[in-house]
């Protein structure tokens, strides 16, 4: 039993899963879109995510399975919908990983001063490095992820309590303007991507029925609180730095403060992308092995690493980074497009809860669904990408199933 996860360890796991270096950059993006209302953006999003976490936690406690959301949807609506949801995860690739790379190299630019084409070349070089690491089966330990998350929280805490060498900006009364708040929530939702990951680990809890739900809620409250504090910190510490949190750190701790933020931003960002590439490549290879995707993606090397899938993912990332540079796409567009895919995944998960859980949970399910629809409103037209992906997946799977049945009838 020693290897099992307790309630508080689970809460820490949720927090470290969600807390990457996004805490250094997302508050700045929400300030750009919502201004003085940005603290309210984070407060509302934290409250909105709690019903979703409660329902996901209850599903994980009642139907523990490594497949997580895809398993819940399959149990509620059948194999085809379960497979569709599993495949939908793959469509985060064109926007999610490039967004994470751009966030990472925002800090690299702040450290080195490199920008423009040279920054793009640095990003592409990092993709090559990630391929070389992954093809040899090298993985960053979960302890490294934990260390980075703890370092991030520690540094933010220090910045909150150390006085600034400059005058602090006065408190600005929020305008409570709905549209900027919704837009900010559409961006900020990125901070809770990965919430579903804890459902994959239900079997690892000591007492799943008792501990998963509180662990998810406590973890979300911790993450939300850190984002609220960081946003307030940036709002009330004047800086003209391109990366606001680096400017705040420099004004409070000197050059070493900005250096620490930059190093953590780059290290944490690359670690996040590395884990992302490793996990998605295995999902790709799994679907290829089942014949759902081209079998070439199932190829593995001597270290049992799905190198073809890794190369495919990194090539997509390289193309998207090039397009982002050439078309001058902004980071917010990439983030919100990826967020749209996860909103659909979470909606499908909560819809499955309507069928799978006791009727007494239905008011909570409806509340969660309505709040997710509100987040969809914040994402706006960028939801079209996620919806088109889901329709395309469903159509292809339906066509293949009909072909399979037609072939079976002929035999």
Image: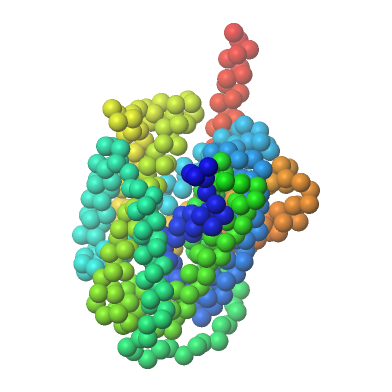
Going 61% across and 46% down the picture, which residue do you hit? 208
Going 54% across and 38% down the picture, which residue do you hit? 66
Q: Nearer the viewer, residue 284 or 216?
A: 216
Q: Position of residue 58 (x, y in %)?
A: 66, 49
| Whether residue 60 is situated above or below residue 369 in the rendered picture | above
- As drawn, the residue found furthest toward the top would be 411
| Whether residue 324 is situated above or below residue 157 in the rendered picture | above
On the question of residue 337 being in view, the answer is no
Relative placement, left or right, of 231 versus 323 is right
| Whether residue 408 is situated above or below residue 282 in the rendered picture | above
Figure disc tally: 0
Q: Nearer the viewer, residue 248 or 185?
A: 248
Q: Nearer the viewer, residue 205 or 402?
A: 205
Going 25% across and 57% down the picture, which residue do you hit? 120
| Whether residue 192 is situated above or below residue 182 in the rendered picture | above
Classify the position of the C terminus by image quarter: top right
On the question of residue 277 being in view, the answer is yes
Q: Position of residue 211 (x, y in %)?
A: 61, 52
- As drawn, the residue found furthest toward the front would be 2
Q: Position of residue 344 (x, y in %)?
A: 58, 50
Q: Position of residue 253 (x, y in %)?
A: 30, 80
How did the renderer colour the structure?
A: rainbow
- As drawn, the residue found furthest toward the right would be 359
Going 61% across and 57% down the picture, which residue do you hit? 214
Quadrant of the rendered image containing residue 69: top right
Relative placement, left or right, of 23 versus 385 is left
């Amino acid at each position: 039993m020693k290897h099992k996860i307790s309630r508080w360890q689970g809460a820490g796991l949720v927090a470290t899963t969600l807390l990457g270096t996004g805490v250094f950059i997302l508050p700045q993006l929400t300030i750009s879109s919502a201004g003085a209302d940005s603290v309210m953006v984070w407060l509302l999003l934290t409250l909105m995510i709690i019903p979703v976490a409660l329902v996901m936690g209850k599903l994980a406690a009642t139907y523990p399975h490594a497949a997580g959301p895809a398993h819940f949807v399959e149990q509620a609506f059948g194999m085809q919908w379960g497979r569709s949801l599993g495949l939908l995860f793959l469509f985060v690739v064109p926007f999610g990983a490039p967004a994470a790379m751009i966030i990472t190299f925002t800090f690299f630019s702040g450290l080195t001063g490199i920008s423009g084409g040279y920054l793009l070349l640095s990003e592409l070089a990092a993709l090559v490095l990630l391929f070389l690491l992954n093809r040899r089966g090298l993985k960053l330990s979960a302890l490294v992820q934990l260390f980075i998350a703890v370092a991030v929280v520690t540094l933010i805490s220090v910045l909150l309590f150390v006085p600034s060498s400059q005058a602090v900006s006065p408190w600005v009364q929020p305008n409570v303007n709905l549209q900027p708040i919704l837009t900010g929530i559409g961006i900020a939702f990125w901070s809770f991507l990965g919430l579903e990951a804890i459902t994959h680990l239900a079997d690892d809890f000591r007492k799943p029925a008792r501990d998963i739900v509180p662990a998810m809620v406590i973890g979300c409250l911790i993450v939300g609180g850190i984002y609220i504090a960081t946003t307030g910190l940036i709002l009330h510490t004047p800086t003209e730095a391109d990366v606001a949190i680096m400017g705040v750190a420099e004004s409070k701790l000197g050059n070493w403060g900005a250096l620490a933020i930059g190093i953590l931003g780059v290290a944490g960002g690359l670690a996040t992308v590395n884990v992302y590439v490793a996990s998605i490549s295995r999902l790709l290879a799994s679907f290829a092995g089942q014949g759902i995707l081209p079998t070439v993606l199932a190829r593995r090397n001597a270290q049992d690493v799905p190198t073809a899938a890794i190369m495919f993912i990194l090539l997509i990332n390289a193309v998207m980074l090039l397009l982002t540079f050439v078309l001058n796409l902004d980071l917010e567009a990439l983030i919100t497009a990826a967020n749209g895919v996860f909103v659909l995944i979470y909606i499908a998960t909560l819809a499955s809860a309507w069928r799978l859980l006791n009727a007494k949970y239905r008011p909570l399910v409806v509340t969660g669904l309505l709040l997710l629809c509100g987040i969809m409103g914040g994402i706006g037209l960028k939801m079209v990408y996620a919806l088109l992906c889901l329709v395309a997946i469903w159509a292809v799977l339906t066509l293949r199933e009909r072909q399979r049945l037609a072939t079976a009838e002929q035999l």
